[in-house]
Image (cartoon, rainbow, N blue to C red):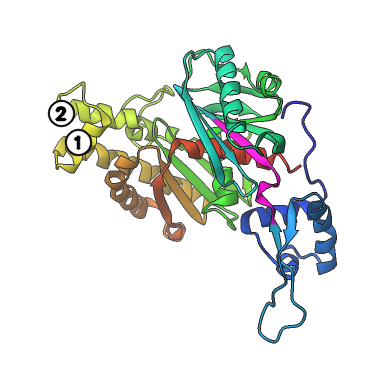
Amino acid sequence: MFPNHANPLVTAPAETTILAILLAESPLSRVELARRTGLSSTAVTKAARPLIDGGYLHELPPERTAPGAGRPVNPLAVTPDREFFVGVWIGADSLHGAVCDLRARVRATAERPLDRLDPAPVVAQLAELVDELLDSAGEFRERTRQLGIVVAGWANRDTGQVSHQLLPGWEDVALAEPVAAATGLTVTVENDVKALTVAEHWFGEGIGTEYFALVTLGARVASGLVVNGELVTGAYGAAGELGHVRVDPDGPACRCGSNGCVEAIASTDAILAAVREAAGDPELDLEGAVRLARDGDPGAREAFVRAGRAVGTGIATLVTLFGPERVVIAAESSDTLDLLDGPIREAYAELCFKAAARCPLSLRPLPPEEWARGGAVIGIQALFP
């Protein structure tokens, strides 16, 4: 994190645990917090006091836990507006930003096209976008100190360097330090899918799970994994590359150098290329490809079925190996969800190991602001040691 690896908000284990639970599930009584953490009610009160004094938590009016119960309890709740967090997603040709509160609720968004794609101009445009977001409400600037930047590619939180898969020349780019200098904020960088996984685990469908997976569909196919409550990065930072699992040895070439990978069959470009070839129309766009498939064109429907089955096969492998309690599948193009849903579920049901197949799949759209929200959640995560 930059600048100066800013100090976390909480360091004591009890404070850390209580704040983490309340961020996701506020409000809760001290009795419930004690039950979940194994701490005594006295220890919970002691751990919560600095967070109350700092304005991060507040007590709600007394309430009784049940008819005839003893003294009323004062539930503890997060104060969402105590601090705000900016997240920015650097896409292939645009920037998307969001301001979120402590509960990761989006309070403002902004976007702008990238005029130039080399790092220095992107840093300047990113700083302008952050200024626009911080000026969009009176309280944002004075209560914001954390900025999370997410990219499609490799990111090193310790050094602040990134390598962007979709931007030429972005290899080991020092991004955090110049952005911190330009914005005055503490900057954390992360891979966009990993950030989205953390956001979903802390504040979405993954709340309360110890084993969780997120799969993204779009220009890339990727996944993030949570095991024992922690995001899995792997020894070399490559854990979760579902898009580069080979599912068809005779399949099309992939940008990774292999062939028959999930991404080579199921990315947006791969589906569109297959439909164009089947239709004999090299100018066909995605909207036209979707329309052809919905109208029953055999070649177009086959392209979407093949893509969905490739994704379902990859997810069956992931679930069989890691056994998540839940898998969320988020698609950048909501228009394709209904065409992919059935084939994904069919392949998953056929190929997943029987006990593991009890893991439910949830499919939903993935708008650009969700990537930016993932960046903001990385900023929230930076409050913790």
Q: Is residue 155 left or right of residue 34?
A: left
Q: Amino acid at mark 1?
A: Ala
Q: Residue at (61%, 17%) from the top-left corner?
A: 172
Q: Residue at (59%, 44%) from the top-left corner?
A: 198
Q: Is residue 337 above or below residue 325?
A: above
- Which residue is disc 1 drawn over? 300
Instruction: Check disc 1 and report its element: helix, strand or loop.
Output: helix
Image location (x, y in percent) of residue 192? 54, 34
Q: Residue furthest bottom?
A: 68
**Which of the 4 quarters of the picture holds residue 331?**
top left
Image location (x, y in percent) of residue 233? 61, 37
Q: Amino acid at mark 2?
A: Ala
Give, as a single range, the part of the protein colored magenta: 78-88
Q: Quadrant of the N terminus?
A: top right
What count of labels does the image hold? Answer: 2
Residue 87 magenta-drawn?
Answer: yes
Q: Residues within 10 Å of mark 2 (few under 14, many from 20)?
A: some
**Which of the 4 quarters of the picture holds residue 88?**
top right
Q: Is residue 154 left or right of residue 292?
A: right
- Which residue is disc 2 drawn over? 279
Instruction: Check disc 2 and report its element: helix, strand or loop.
Output: helix
**Which of the 4 quarters of the picture holds residue 8?**
top right
Q: Is residue 233 visible?
A: no
Q: Are marks 1 and 2 in contact (CB under 8 Å)?
A: yes
